[in-house]
Structure formats: structure tokens, C-alpha cells
């Protein structure tokens, strides 16, 4: 049987990176890994988005690679994973022509146990302010993070996306607060609740959250695998009627 011929052209470096968001301490955070402080590393000791090379023995496709990277770093499977885009050029990696395929994920903070892995010396959540984090990022990851934040905030304006930052059961106040954290602005309470309840995206569960104030009704998503789209964006509180 004739063996397939090896391609005669050089192969580019192929990686998958994942922009992983959560909410901690009332702020949006992104997961970063610190690269090894090794002279052979193109960005020794610098912080970067988690990711790595495609493993042709483990990854059936790009999404499988993204899910593997997410699971390796956090120990969880994200309830929401979306392809963000691809970046490739001769300049993004000093080791050669490189292309990365980027996904972004939303996860609640509670079940996460961070794992730095063998190719990193640290892994941490970093708060996002505007479009930046306090660390200078390796490769073109600052630009990728900026793109991910723009996509996230744009979609939050008219979808149920922030619910994936919450645990399975939540109050409407929890949901409104996570919208406000991502958008970095307040939302009018009654209009928000009307829109959420009229969209039929949540259903009440048979228990209440007890606390210092009166008990609050708990809700959950009706269809966890489906994103709900609203007919209008969430306007800032001062623009509400």
C-alpha cells in the first residue's frame, strides 16, 4: 500500500488558547498562567492566557483541545465555551510562524481548583479593569484579551450570558449584580427583572435563600445549554423610563 507523502512545506506552530472569565470579590477576573523562567522560553517568567499546542493524539478538533486546556487548568468543564477567533503571523512567536485558535469560557468561581501544570510556574485569577490587567502579557495575548472582553460585554447587553458565571441556583439579585459587574455600570432593577422573567429563561426552584433580610426566591436556568437573546439591550439606569 502506498504511503501518503509528507508535505513539502514547513508547518506552522498550532496552538489553542482559552480566555477564562469568572467573578470574584465583586469583580470580573481572567485566568493567567506564568510561563517558566527558562532561557529557552520565548517569554520567560511572563504571564499569559492558558493554552498550548494541539495534541493530535488527544484532540479530535480545536474545541476538544480548548476543553482539555480548560479542564487541566481549572478542574471543571465550562457551561459556556465560544470560539473567539484566530491569530497568526510570522511575528507573534519568536520560535516561528504561529497560529493560535482562541476560545473564551465563563465559569462560576466556587468549584474551581487551579492547577498550574508542568509548563507553568504559577496560575492565578487577575481582576480586569476596563480592558486591562496589571500584568504585561506574553505574545499578543493583551490584544486577544481585549477582543474577548469586547465580545463578552457586547453579548451581555442582549443575552443571558452572565448566568454562566453563577452557580446552578441563584437569586434575581445575584443575576443582576453579575450583569452589572461585567458591564461596569448599574442596571435598573424592575426593568431587569421584567425582562428576565418575561424571557422565560429561568424557573423558580422549591426553596428560598435564607439571610439577614427576608428570604429570597432561588432560580435556575430552564435550558442550560441554550443562550437566550433579548429583543433590546440593557440601557444604563439613568436612561431607563
Image (tube, rainbow, N blue to C red):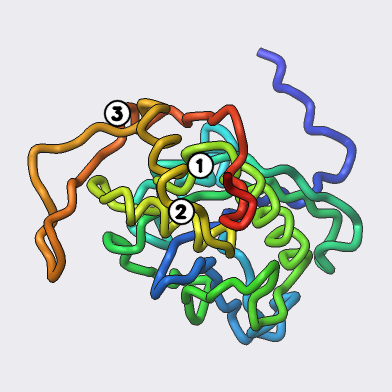
Dots 1, 2 in contact, CB < 8 A = yes
* Residue plotted at (10% across, 60% down): 210
Nearer to us: label 3 or label 1? 3
Q: Quadrant of the N terminus?
A: top right
Q: Residues within 10 Å of mark 3 (few under 14, many from 20)?
A: few
- Residue 53 in sight: no
Image mark for residue 70 = 2
Give how far across and how far down residue 20 sits, in percent: 52, 58
* Residue plotted at (75% across, 44% down): 86
Image mark for residue 81 = 1
Label 2 sits on a secondary structure element that is helix
Query: Observer-nearest residue: 140 or 107?
Result: 107
Give how far across and how far down residue 89 sits, in percent: 88, 53
Query: Observer-nearest residue: 64 or 233?
Result: 233
Q: Quadrant of residue 109?
A: bottom left
Please determine whether, in this image, residue 165 is positioned above or below residue 115.
above
Amino acid at each position: 500500500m502506498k504511503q501518503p507523502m509528507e508535505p513539502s512545506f514547513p508547518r506552522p506552530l498550532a496552538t489553542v488558547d482559552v480566555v477564562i472569565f469568572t467573578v470574584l470579590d465583586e469583580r470580573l477576573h481572567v485566568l493567567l498562567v506564568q510561563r517558566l523562567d527558562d532561557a529557552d522560553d520565548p517569554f520567560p517568567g511572563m504571564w499569559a492566557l492558558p493554552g498550548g499546542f494541539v495534541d493530535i493524539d488527544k484532540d479530535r478538533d480545536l474545541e476538544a483541545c480548548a476543553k482539555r486546556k480548560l479542564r487541566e487548568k481549572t478542574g471543571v468543564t465550562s457551561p459556556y465555551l465560544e470560539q473567539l477567533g484566530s491569530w497568526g503571523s510570522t511575528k507573534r512567536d519568536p520560535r516561528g510562524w504561529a497560529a493560535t485558535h482562541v476560545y473564551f469560557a465563563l465559569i462560576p468561581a466556587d468549584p474551581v481548583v487551579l492547577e498550574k501544570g508542568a509548563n507553568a510556574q504559577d496560575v492565578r485569577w487577575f481582576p480586569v479593569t476596563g480592558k486591562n490587567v496589571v500584568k504585561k502579557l506574553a505574545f499578543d495575548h493583551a490584544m486577544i484579551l481585549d477582543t474577548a472582553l469586547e465580545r463578552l460585554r457586547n453579548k451581555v447587553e442582549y443575552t443571558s450570558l452572565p448566568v454562566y458565571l453563577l452557580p446552578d441556583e441563584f437569586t434575581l439579585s445575584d443575576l443582576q449584580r453579575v450583569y452589572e459587574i461585567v458591564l461596569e455600570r448599574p442596571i435598573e432593577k424592575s426593568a431587569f427583572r421584567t425582562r428576565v422573567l418575561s424571557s422565560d429563561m429561568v424557573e423558580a426552584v422549591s426553596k428560598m435563600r435564607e439571610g439577614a433580610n427576608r428570604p429570597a426566591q432561588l432560580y435556575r436556568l430552564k435550558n442550560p445549554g441554550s443562550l437566550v437573546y433579548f429583543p433590546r439591550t440593557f440601557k444604563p439606569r439613568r436612561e431607563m423610563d
